[in-house]
């Protein structure tokens, strides 16, 4: 006969099930806490970007504008007798103007005011146009109707597009690119495509999927989304992002 201390097999299974469920709940709680902390960190980063961008635009930018005006006023007082001084002054005005434009561009890249003022789609149009003009790559924006998006998700999608298109400009050798964004259940899909060819070597893949996209992948995951990069000779390179409107898992990008 079995001893009194022998436990039925069903009791052991039930205990294991309870332990498994407890461990699963703890894991889910830890993942939720990680996402919360990650999103709080990125929120602080964006706030700091916004502050620096404002300082560049309203502080340094305005000072450079005032300096340029003062140099122009000084130029107007020259009588034309000192050609060397006139040439140096003209060069100083040109340098001041270029520095002012660089400062404004840096301010826009840090945190484009258009994103805060007009929203995601106008910001994406500005991004595609500015990168295309600077790099000589034809970038088309295909923007479908979008559902209402909170400020954090708009910022996230803009940053992913910014990183994806920057990689196209820097590394792909592409002549054409398409940035597409549209609503697709249960949220939003964003795609960056370019005709720069495949990624045959491991080092090429790492270069295209470097620290920038790795950071974006983590950031997308913190919002319950997925980021996927793939490449083939016949189809070019695709960066696909799925982002739900809430924090549920949308499944892998396809």
Image (cartoon, rainbow, N blue to C red):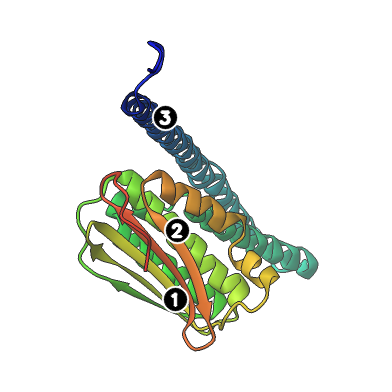
Count neighbours of disc 2 (C-alpha within 10 A) and say few if under 14, some if 14 to 19, many if 20 or more: many
Residue 113 visible at all: no
Q: Residue furthest bottom?
A: 234
C-alpha separation, residue under disc 2 versus residue under disc 3: 34 Å
- Give the mark, 2 or 3, whose residue is nearer the N terminus: 3
Identify residue for label 2.
160
Quadrant of the image containing the N terminus? top left
Identify residue for label 3.
23
Mark 2 secondary-structure assignment: helix
Count neighbours of disc 3 (C-alpha within 10 A) and say few if under 14, some if 14 to 19, many if 20 or more: few
- For image coordinates 68% across by 66% down, the residue present is 90
The spot of residue 208 in percent (x, y) is 60, 67
Disc 3 to disc 1: CB gap under 8 Å: no
Quadrant of the image containing the C terminus? bottom left
Identify residue for label 1.
193
Residue 217 visible at all: yes
C-alpha separation, residue under disc 3 versus residue under disc 1: 41 Å
Q: Nearer the viewer, mark 2 or mark 3?
A: 3
Q: Quadrant of the rendered structure where residue 40 is?
A: top left
The spot of residue 7 in percent (x, y) is 37, 19
Q: Which mark is residue 120?
A: none
Q: Nearer the viewer, mark 3 or mark 1?
A: 3
Count neighbours of disc 1 (C-alpha within 10 A) and say few if under 14, some if 14 to 19, many if 20 or more: many
């Amino acid at each position: 006969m079995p001893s009194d201390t022998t436990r039925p097999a069903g009791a052991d299974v039930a205990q294991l099930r309870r332990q498994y469920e407890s461990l699963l709940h703890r894991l889910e709680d830890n993942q939720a806490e990680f996402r919360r902390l990650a999103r709080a960190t990125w929120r602080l980063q964006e706030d700091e970007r916004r502050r620096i961008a404002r300082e560049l635009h309203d502080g340094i930018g305005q000072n450079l504008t005032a300096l340029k005006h003062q140099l122009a006023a000084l130029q107007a007082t020259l009588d034309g007798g000192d050609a060397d001084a006139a040439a140096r002054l003209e060069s100083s005005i040109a340098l001041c103007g270029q520095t002012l434009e660089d400062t404004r561009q840096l301010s826009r890249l840090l945190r484009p005011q258009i994103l805060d003022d007009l929203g995601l789609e106008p910001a994406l149009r500005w991004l595609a146009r500015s990168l295309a003009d600077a790099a000589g790559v034809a970038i088309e924006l295909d923007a479908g109707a979008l559902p209402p998006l909170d400020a954090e998700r708009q910022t996230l999608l803009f940053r992913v597009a910014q990183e994806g298109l920057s990689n196209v400009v820097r590394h792909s050798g592409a002549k054409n690119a398409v940035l597409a964004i549209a609503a697709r259940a249960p949220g939003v899909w964003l795609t960056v495509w370019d005709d720069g060819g495949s990624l045959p070597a491991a080092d090429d893949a790492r270069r295209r999927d470097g620290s920038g996209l790795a950071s974006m992948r983590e950031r997308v995951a913190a919002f319950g989304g997925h980021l996927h990069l793939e490449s083939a000779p016949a189809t070019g390179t695709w960066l696909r992002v799925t982002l739900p409107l809430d924090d549920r898992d949308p499944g892998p990008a396809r």
